[in-house]
Amino acid sequence: MKAIASLLTEARQRLPLLLQGDESFAEAKFAEHRQFVSFALIIVALSIPSLWLWDLTTDPTHAQLTLQYRAYYLLGLPLGLAFLSSAFSRRTLVTLMALFLLVGIIVFLEILKLLNDGFIHGMPGFMYGMIISILTSQCLPVLQGFLFTLLAVLLPHLYAATGLIEHFPHLRYGVLMWHALSLTLLAQYAIADNYLKRHLSEMQLKHASEHDPLSGLGNRRLLQQRLHAINNTSAAPKCTSLLIIDIDHFKSINDRFGHDNGDLVITHLGRMLQQIESKDSSSYRIGGEEFAILTHLPTHDAEALAEHIRTQAASAQIISRQGDAIPFTISIGLTCTPTPNEAFDILFSRADQALYQAKHQGRNQTVRL
């Protein structure tokens, strides 16, 4: 019972994440399942037209009239292939998919209208639609998947209410479909929740692989990734500056105050750098006592930022675990990439040379190359 209670508690905690419609999660869910949905649409496009053979066996007289309606589902072939292409956005593809399937229900009703006893023989086909809904809704956010399935179930009722279907077996349809709807929604939720658990676990692992656990800043790997992303974007910023920051005489701090107090200096500097992060600037810990800032500020503003950080560090009041004041200063090497798509190693090497000069010239200063 405790295990079940624990599972229910975890599910309740994830429920807001499933229902809030987070755009990044929606994109990740779509990317994860788009290939699967593509195969489902292609199977629909091939299987439903082939069911014309069923029309032929149940009502050979009117089967010829249903052939053109069965051909409608062949549109699922190009749509399924479109899901494999990156040329279309998520919103475009899911909109086309929803329209294709919802119109497919109306087409199916027209087929049943043409056949003698079509609604009797074709009623199980609506259950097939529920399977299709489970398969294709995997690429949708949970609420959109629920609404899509609910509309798919309501559509025959709405179609009949407008008088477009005569002698529609409402009671039989309701007995067949409304309990199937609850099971379908439960299946959609279970699939989405299972994916969310894996997605959260992957995000935690990704965050751990890209961030320094002590300072909370990004690590060198994340710095390289972001600079690579900047260089490969079509709208690269006019200026990209790299600041490399080194804590002066950090070994002496460790020797004098102990490594645990050395960690206090690192975490304090990490918090300082987090405070200056913005859409133009991001901070990283790239080594033991080395940090970096990647910024798109103009060069003179990047220099002003470097000086602000340096003076803030020099005036910091850090108290050791033993109650002693820990003085520390930093040296900063700054460089700005003069050309787009400059390799990370080249940019980093130039900033490192500037840092070396700052330390060689007496430390606690900023040098730009």
Image (cartoon, grey):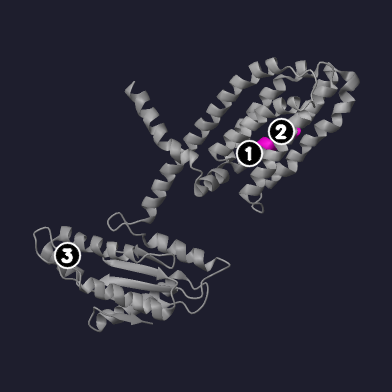
Residue ID for mark 3:
318
Residue shown at 48%/39% (left/top)? 18
Dominant secondary structure (helix, strand or loop) of the stretch shown in magenta: helix
Residue ID for mark 1:
37
Local SS, label 2: helix
Write the start and end of the magenta stretch as one range: 40-46
Residue ID for mark 2:
44
Residue 193: % across, % down? 48, 35
Labels 2 and 1: the sequence-earlier one: 1
How far apart are the two marked residues, 1 and 3, measured between alpha carbons?
56 Å
Local SS, label 1: helix
Local SS, label 3: loop
Residue 249, quarter of picture: bottom left
**Image quarter in which the C terminus is found:** bottom left
Query: For this view, does 145 lie left or right of residue 226?
Result: right
**Image quarter in which the N terminus is found:** top left
Q: Say whether residue 197 is visible.
A: no
Position of residue 33 relative to residue 357, above or below, is above
Residue 47: % across, % down? 74, 30
Residue 52: % across, % down? 82, 26
Residue shown at 71%/35% (left/top)? 102
The reply to whether callout 2 and callout 1 are in contact (CB within 8 Å) is no
Of residues 118 and 156, the one drawn nearer to the viewer in this rendering: 156
